[in-house]
Amino acid sequence: MSRTNGLEAQDTHLVLVRHGQSLYNRDGEAAGADSGLTELGWRQAQAVAEWLAHHYRPTALIASNLARAQQTADVIAHRLRLPIVTCQGFAEAETSYWEELPQPQADPLAAWEENWRPEAANAPFYVAFRARLRAALAQILIDFAGQTVIVVSHGGSIGTILRSLFGGHNLKVFTENTGVTQLTFHEGHWQLVCHNATQHLAGLQPNGAGAQTLSVAASTDSPGPGGSSASFAAIIQHFQRVANAAPPNLTYPTERDLGALLRLAAPQPTDRVLDAGTGAGSVALAFAPYAANVTAVDLSPAMLERAETFRAARQITNVHLRLGEVSSLSLPEHGFEIVSCHDLLHYAPEPGVLLARLRVLLAPGGRLVLDDIRGSDDPVKRATQNAIEVRRDPVTSQIHSAGEIEQLLEGAGFRIERLERYGAQRELEEWLAHAAADETTRTAVRSMLETGLEADSAGLNVRRQRDDQIIFTQARIRVLATPDRSPI
């Protein structure tokens, strides 16, 4: 019998993976039972995906239908290049079945000779839960006999499978977030190869404190055409600080700006929307009531936690968060009627490549809505403005003028249908807080703006109010574009 990666090729291998840490795991009932992943949960998912890629060659990836399992599985799917098969049978129980399990006993060996057995009379919820899990397992054993299958599930589901297969319902089973359990069916017997393997979690700590840094690019064959792994890592680290430092209610764009963006995009109930660089999810959540579904993509686990917090609080079910870089993440070509690109262009090291990628993702007749900082038409003022933006936000790549943005869009194969120039008033201290600027940065940016008060050297119309607060006008551009029918 041949072997692959140390596994018997004709055996059936079930690799059970608990989902990453969810908001509910961390914050309790206030977060909602079907909440998605925290920042730590996304990083755990990255870590286990990398570990699985080095230890298994699976033929299938199955996941519970619950948000935390789906988000964990999505990261694994991207790394292993496998589609996700959703199976509701592996979802966590909706009722408190564990209250039906045997009560604690003073004698630690009380169950040695006489195991408690669940029956409909003494454990109706537990019996129903086991029956659902059994049916899901039975289907796997039919569909994937002799193969290696990864199943992303839940602590209660994994524990119940182990208790049921090995006949110990008195046993309490703990599985860490993204802990790995391998079961192998070999020569008519189940073997417990490992339970709760967590080597991949070494160094991971909550909120990134002293934690290893796993960039999205590190878990792919290449960083994608839109930038380098170094630039992606810098962006991830920067927005980790932003997400953890900025007040929860301090978000751009404003409700007024979101309304203008929606009017420009004119979403329809059947539209599929992609929000590239979703950040805290404001744009994605604004589209949700008016579209069929919204895929919200971002590089930053910390910002996705913030987006998930807002999504769960508003009980929005048609927004799906994905961790990754839009240029390399597996997304359906021509799969979206609307692609939104808000405050992403000025971060892109290669904006033309990014826009070309977004064009490929648009369905025939689809539309791109782009909203970004607009640099001055005066190259000297634009250079000054760019220096200020980079000082405040060090992962800024380049501020573009309206003319440059038009050229980038046309070069990527877009036809501009509508272009709106507008200004957004910013209060300096709030603007700095939004970027989690430290005191040294605040002092430097304040000095740069004050230096140009009289001459308007950055084209920002900087002015000082009576209370000595500094305000300025950030020039912006809002564009509706459609794919040019002619080839690029």
Image: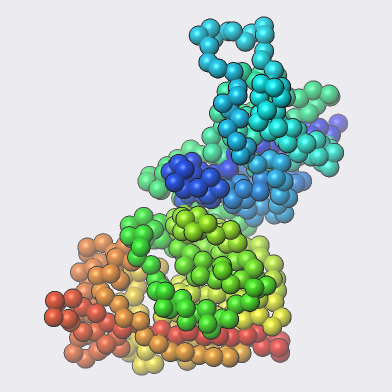
> Residue most toward the front?
121
At x 44% / y 46%, what residue is drawn? 30
Query: Quick check: 465 above or below 176?
Result: below
At x 69% / y 67%, what residue is drawn? 332
At x 24% / y 84%, what residue is drawn? 462
Query: Quick check: 1 above or below 355?
Result: above
Q: Residue 95's x, y, as percent? A: 60, 36
Left or right? Give the position of 447 relative to 385.
left
Q: Residue 271's x, y, as percent? A: 65, 73
Name the foreground residue: 29 vs 242.
29
Name the foreground residue: 471 vs 8.
471
Specify the quadrant that holds the N terminus.
top right
Left or right? Give the position of 376 relative to 482.
left
Q: Quadrant of residue 484?
A: bottom right
Q: Residue 292's x, y, as percent? A: 64, 68
Specify the quadrant that holds the C terminus.
bottom right
- Residue 398, visible in the rendered structure: no
Q: Residue 155's x, y, as percent? A: 59, 35
Query: Quick check: 281 above or below 150?
Result: below
